[in-house]
Image (cartoon, helix red, strand yellow):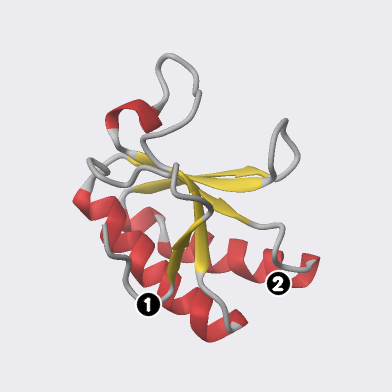
Amino acid sequence: MDLPLGLAVASDTVVLDGVDPQLMVYAEHLGMAHQLLFGKPLTITSGKDGAHAPNSFHNIGRALDVRTVDLDIEEQLLLLNVIAFSAPPQGVAVFDERAVHGEPHIHLEFHGV
């Protein structure tokens, strides 16, 4: 899958094929804002790949994880504010998973509009 300007994947194991198109549109817009604000693309660390809970929205293509470790704490807070403002109208729930096991990230989950 060719990614638009502002989006990147952490590795070639990240699967975006089959991710809900509306969630991908939101990710593309968020990626453009990320590129403008921080001068680098928003990195997706997980789509339909990886080991997730049995009922995870990742398994049905309705969740993405995005990297935060490439931003300093002030930049992370700015990104979270942008997401908190922009996600709900698009039907996207946000989970701050920077302090859970594994790589720190923000989990985006599409619930529909």
Which residue position is annotated with label 2?
75
- Element marked by disc 2: helix
Report the residue at 72% width, 30% height from top: 101
- Tell me the SS state at disc 1: loop
The residue shown at (75%, 40%) is 99
Q: Quadrant of residue 63?
A: top left
Q: In which quadrant is the N terminus drawn?
A: bottom left
How would you rate the neighbour count of disc 2 (Cα within 10 Å): few for under 14, some for 14-19, many for 20 or more?
some
Any mark on residue 5, and which? 1
**Which mark is nearer the camera, 1 or 2?**
1
Quarter of the image where one finds residue 22: bottom left
Question: Could you tell me if residue 61 is visible in this image?
Answer: yes
Position of 52 with respect to 71 (left or right) is: left
State which tag comes first along the sequence, 1 or 2. Answer: 1
Can residue 109 be spotted in the picture? no
- Please state which of residues 26 and 51 is positioned toward the viewer in this rendering: 51
**Residue 12 position in % (x across, y down):** 44, 49
Looking at the rendered structure, the kind of residue marked 1 is Leu
Answer with the quarter of the image where residue 69 lies. bottom right
54 lies left or right of 96: left
Q: Residue furthest right?
A: 73
Give the x, y percent position of residue 110.
Answer: 33, 43
